[in-house]
Each structure stands twice: as C-alpha cells, then as structure tokens.
Amino acid sequence: MRGTIKDILHITGVQGYIIVTEKNIQIKLPSKHKLARAKDRIRRLYNDLADEKQRPGNVVEIYLKDMIVTVFMNKTTMLLVLSSQRVNLALLRMTGKLTLSNIVKEK
Amino acid sequence: MSMDISGDLENTRCPEIIKILSLGKRTGRLFLSNGAENGDIFFRDGSVIHSQSGLLQGVKSIYELSIWTSGIYRFFVDEAPEMMTIDISIDDILAEIANRIRQMDKVTSLIPSSSTVYMLEPDLDEKEFTLKSVQWKIIVHINGKKSIAEIAQNIGIGISDAMKVFYTLIKLGILKEAGDLNADVSGTIAELPDTAFINSVKNDLVKAIGPIAPIIISETAKDMDIDLVSDDIGQKAALIETLSSRIPDENMSLMFLDTMTDWLKSEE
C-alpha cells in the first residue's frame, strides 16, 4: 500500500505537516509558517484528541482565516497537514488516512 | 502488522493456501474475503488453531471458507487469535475439505449460487416425507424472497451446509426456484454511467463489499448530489472518500482508498 508523506506534499496547496506521538513532535513547515514554532499548542491539541480507542480514519478539519489544518488520528499518532484553502480536501483526506495508516504500521 | 502473502481466490483456493502455510510452518492470520463476507484462519507454527467467519467458529468456519471460489486473501504475519477453537491435524482438515468440495461440486450442478431464491412447490404430489430438524428449520424460512445465504444466516449455519439441505429438498420435489437476487443487481449496474472512472470505482467496490456495490454508488451519489458523469475531480474525490467509509472492513477500506487515490492522481 502506498500513501506516504511525499504523496501528501505533492498535493497542490499543502504547506507542510506535523507528526505527533506520545513522546515526539516532528514539524516540517517553512520556517516562517505561523505554526512552525507552535509545539505547545500542538501538544495541547494532541492531548485533547489522542485516544487509544479511536478508530483509524478519524479526521478533524480546522478552518482558519488563511489556512486549513487537517488533523488525522490513529490510536496515539496524530498527523496534521497544513494547507491553503484552495486544496482538494477530499484528496487530502484520502491520502492522509492512507499515510497515517502506514506510519502507524511501521512504528 | 505485516502482510507477506496475498492474492485472488480465483487463482489459489483456500485449501492450497492452507497447505502452503502449513508446510512453511507459518504463524499468523489468513484473512479471506469473498466481497460479501470475511473470514480468518489463524496458524501457529503451521498448525491451524482457530477460525472465524460470520457466526461460525472452529473447523466449521474453515470448511465454509474452503469452498469460496472468488475473492481475495491476505496473510498477516504473527497475528494471534484471542481464543483457540481447533485441535485437529492439518491432514484431517484437508481430507474433510476435499470431501466437502466434492459434495459442493454436485450441489452447484443443481443450485447456481447461494443468492438463488426458492419457494415451496405449490403442485406437490401427495407424498410422505420424513424431514430432519435442520431441513424443517430451513423450510419455515422459505418465502420466495430470502436467498439461501440469507436463510443460512438466519438460522446460523454455514452457506455450504444450507446449500446441501436445499439440494436434498429440491431433489425431493419440495422446492422450486423463485428467482435470483443477482438479476436485481445487474439491473442496477446498468443504471450507472459507463465511464472509466465509474467502472473503476464499481470494480474495486465490488471486491470490497460484493455485488451490492453498484446500488451503494448510486445511492451515495444521489445523497451527496453528485453528478456521476462530471469531470470535477473534487466531486470524484468526495464520492470515493464517502464510499470508503461505507466499507466495514478497515483493511479493505484502506485498499479501496489506495487504488482510487492512484486513479485520481493519474487524472490530475
């Protein structure tokens, strides 16, 4: 099964991504991006959403003034994809679900 | 969870896969799906220790899975069952499977598929019959609407066992064919537009959820107000995403998403 971070980054409008686990936060965003240094806020979001019992495929979309944050949850791993508002959201959701499923499998 | 063997049941039937996994002394879960139903067979060091398909467990489940002639299989290494229900040697299991396949060949020469619907023969000659309890349990469910598969599910027996009972009842002259549910489905298939995209969605969804797929596509598109002949990539992606959420099996759902994501990317 494919579905990799590279596939997400190839979607037009995607600015970067963040992967959060219980112990780590990996941020891959342009250095000037407003969430590039938002580790504490992201950790709080993770603490609110992470749940062992959650079904893979759960997706939360946060619409901000100038961007969309798409949050994928799978057990205790969270993938956030930051994109412009002109992104193909359905394609992003499909690729994000596959990618996170692969990330969790490889752990 | 890692997967190392997979393929189609059209090319490799279940007994052959069991032999391969047994000879290789493998440990893990063999997942099988015929589109409408799923089943699992668990191996430990090449021995079969548990099986489950629908309401069936143990060897009955293996015998049911072994007669499937279409669908897919995947082997997930090192997955263990929550319980053990089988303590029979592989040789005994394979011998019984071979016996059942022979019986099923005879049955399918008279009954085309488990989706066939039967009704009671109204012009029954006056005869005396002695019925077994399982035959009676089936007769009370026969109404000219329920298929063999549905009746088997209602009374909690395997489809192959139900087909054998139907075979006996037909031979006795108690039942006659009322119609085939597939006829309704093919009518719906014809209603879907004949485009490369829709054909691809339909084929992959049939693999995941069976012949009901065209109806699900049609209903989902209607609910979402999506034009199935539109070239809008956003609409196509939205349709695929919603359809994937209607596939109950998580692995199948991800496989469907995977294939269709590739399809959409090639369109972009």
Image (tube, rainbow, N blue to C red):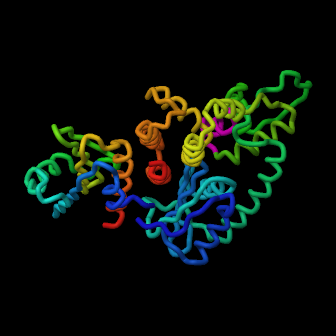
Say which quarter of the image contains residue B197.
top right
Residue range in magenta is B147-157
Q: How many marks?
A: 0
Majority secondary structure in the magenta region: helix
Residue A25: % across, % down:
16, 61
Q: Can residue B137 be seen in this view?
A: no
Nearest the camera: B170 or B18? B18
As for residue B191 lying within the magenta part, the answer is: no
Residue A78 vertical position relative to residue A63 in the rendered view, above or below? below
Q: In which quarter of the image is the N terminus of chain B?
A: bottom left
Residue A7: % across, % down:
36, 58
Residue B251: % across, % down:
46, 54
Q: Residue at x 63, y 44 (%)?
A: B157
Residue furthest top in the image: B122
Nearest the camera: B237 or B213? B237
Residue B70: % across, % down:
66, 53
In screen coordinates, is B156 left or right of B225? Answer: right
In screen coordinates, is B54 left or right of A66? Answer: right
Residue A64 vertical position relative to residue B49 in the rendered view, above or below? above
In screen coordinates, is A53 left or right of B216? Answer: left
As for residue B155 lying within the magenta part, the answer is: yes
Q: Is residue B157 visible?
A: yes
In screen coordinates, is A32 left or right of B41? Answer: left
Q: Which residue is drawn at 22% across and 58% down?
A: A19
Q: Which residue is drawn at 38% across and 48% down?
A: A94
Say which quarter of the image contains residue B124.
top right
